[in-house]
Image (cartoon, rainbow, N blue to C red):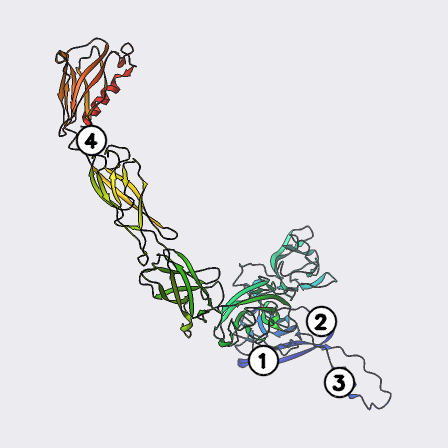
Amino acid sequence: MKSQNFTRERKKSKYQETSLSQHLPGGHHHYTLKRQRLPLKPPEPIAEGPCVACTGAQEEEEKVECVPGFQENDYQVEYSGGFLKDIPLLQVVFDDCAGNEGVEFEVSNPDFLIDDNLNLVARRDVIDSGDVMFVHGVNVHVDDMAQVTIMGAPSRSPQTLREILGLSDMMPYRSKRSLLVPPMFVPENQRAPFPRLIGKVISSDMKEDHIFRLTGRGADQDPKGVFSINRLTGEVAVSRALDREAIAYYHLQVSTTDLSGKLVEGPVDLDVSVIDQNDNRPVFKEPRYSGEVLEGSPTGTTVMTMTAYDADDPNTDNAVLRYIIVRQLPDKPSPNMFYIDPERGDIVTVIRANQLDRETLPTTQYELEIVAKDMAGSEVGLTGTATATITITDRNDHAPEFTHSLFQASVNEGSTGVVVNLTVDDRDDPATGAWRAIYSIINGDPNQNFEIQTNLDNNEGMLSVIKPLDYESAMFHTLLIKVENEDPLVPDVVYGHSSTATVYITVMDVNEGPVFFPDPLVVIRRENIPVGSFVAMLNATDPDYLQTQSIRFAVLRDPADWLIVNPFKGNVTTRAILDRESPHVHNNQYTALFLATDNGNPPASGTGTLIITLEDENDNAPYIFPSVARVCEDAKDMNVVVIGGRDKDIHPNTDPFKIELGKQPGLEKTWKISRINDTHSQIMLLHSLKKANYNLPLVLTDSGVPPISNNTELKVQVCTCKKNRMDCSRAGSIQTNLLLLLGLVLLSILCL
């Protein structure tokens, strides 16, 4: 575990050296030389007489200020053939001035360790131990290092600086081994004076003409000049205060050169770690947090999570946060309605479920002031603050209730629209599904004359008539209305009697207009019947059968002005000839509207429709199309045109048509007509004609009974034709494209 590191300045002390000899099994023995720091004592006062009250003074003199770390920093062990497994070499003296809790030791030589009694022991039988090793002791209070020198030990082969520092498994192998570069540690935010020594590099092969050189980031690379090395002694110093949050680690290189700059030894890595100090306050990601909790939620319900962060070292207590609630507004019904998990920041409910009632609480929103404190919440920790707003949301724990058990309304017969607004009370949160009402008619409306909808603005039920009511059929209507919420009720709440209401509807009598029956009235009549002929008998009744009223008839709309009605009896007769071919007739039907008015006060009227289906008579002569034809004077094709017959009448008074030449003598010598089908015939020339206009007499007869014939003419223009163009100018016509004319003739034949 990486722990917080501290540097310290040691008090001056005297040293006492003690030589210990220890016999080992198998005839082995080794000697231990221990240098012990002794505190300096002030000079003893000269006694001028007996000291009566000297005890307290002596005790005060004997009190020594505790300096955290190794109380002895240099140890020596004499090598005598090796070290046996689990046999103590020496005992280190370490005191963090706080009880030595959580102290961890690391030995640079992985074959050795510090046991629970602070003894340096070998993990296995070791012969090749090397001549020096370092012991690193660390906990939250102190970070210190001691050196153990193996006197008379043979050199390891190979023995490298990385192995001495315990880095052989992590770093590439180097054969250089005379530079000893321990890792160094610097607390951030140190105060002047600067520079401050932070460690020392040792070279076993250092000569008078050799100097130390420091390179890398923080030395000769940006940020330049942070660290420096004494060229002669190898002492490394920091030149200014550091900020761990800006740069937490510096990787430099140490080497030795001669005075000309030629490399002698190295480079060897120097790692400088910046020790964190608690110089950053916890900061919440947001200044205000919002959360919701449903009313009636059980105790322990998680509402929201508060999250803060601390820029200090996350591996130290400087960034270990604890959360607390320092204030709740309002503080009713309890100042401790909520609890925050000190480590996770989860806010949960503490209040009992039956007390978390939105309708009875003094407010639906509570504000909590949350404090995050680093140093695991200790008194010396720094703090950050944020606000949490918690909204108590509604659940449907109150059924809607009508404000009255009985509502009354009146409505005129024959009218529609809203007749009454039903009001309800609901204690749940407005504008939510737990408050919005849904109304339904559960009895009294077999014919679906009514509907009820919710007014979204005020939650009232708007009862409307959608099918007109009839006073004569029912003077009163009794409806049973039920109200519910959009959201279902919670399991322990049900709809009661107050969630239903009765509505009495009184229908008011209104003078209603007469009603035609049937409507529309459909009759069949033949066209061309004589004026004054009977067409139909209108029938209208007054719905107000409880009253005695008379009815008068009148024509309301007669597009062709063909009809007349008796105002008292309602019989309809013709006042003009009915013509099926009139533009007022559509699909053989003629439509007229009539008005029936009673003598009530005020009078009321109704309308009825009369539809006359007209049967056809053969009263229209047929006609030909086209009426004009063009032909070239030198045409080799004697076919002039295909003509057809048309008739305004309908079958059987139309085709088949009979097309013949007129009765003028000599026509049959120049013209010929050939029948193609029931409606079309071919007009042909028997010989060429000169350029001129010719009128060909024709007789067209339909198939009606009796048939009707039409004596008509076909105008034939004989034109000059050159290069597919037709010149009919002298014949009294414009130029026409011959190909277009032939195409039209061919299209007429194909459509037959």
Point out residue 508 in the picture as x, y percentages from the top left corner. 38, 60
Point out residue 377 in the picture as x, y percentages from the top left corner. 61, 72
Question: Which of labels 1 and 3 is toward the front?
Answer: 3
Real-space Cα separation, disc 2 to disc 4, in angstroms: 132 Å
Of pointers 1 and 2, the one earlier in the residue sequence: 2
Amino acid tagged 1: Asn
Q: Nearer the viewer, residue 36 or 625?
A: 625
Of pointers 2 and 4, the one earlier in the residue sequence: 2
SS for callout 4: loop
Of pointers 4 and 1, the one earlier in the residue sequence: 1
Q: Nearer the viewer, residue 509 or 681?
A: 509
Q: Quadrant of the C terminus?
A: top left
- Residue 344 visible (yes or no): no
Which residue is labeled 3 in the image? 59
Of pointers 3 and 4, the one earlier in the residue sequence: 3
Q: Nearer the viewer, residue 186 or 252?
A: 186
Question: Which of labels 2 and 4 is toward the front?
Answer: 4
Which residue is labeled 2 in the image? 10
The reply to whether discs 1 and 3 touch (Cβ–Cβ < 8 Å) is: no
Real-space Cα separation, disc 1 to disc 3, in angstroms: 29 Å
Q: Residue at x 49, y 76 (%)?
A: 354
Of pointers 1 and 3, the one earlier in the residue sequence: 3
Real-space Cα separation, disc 3 to disc 4, in angstroms: 145 Å
Which residue is labeled 4 in the image? 649
Q: Residues within 10 Å of mark 4 (few under 14, many from 20)?
A: many
Q: Is residue 80 left or right of residue 586?
A: right
The reply to whether discs 1 and 2 touch (Cβ–Cβ < 8 Å) is: no
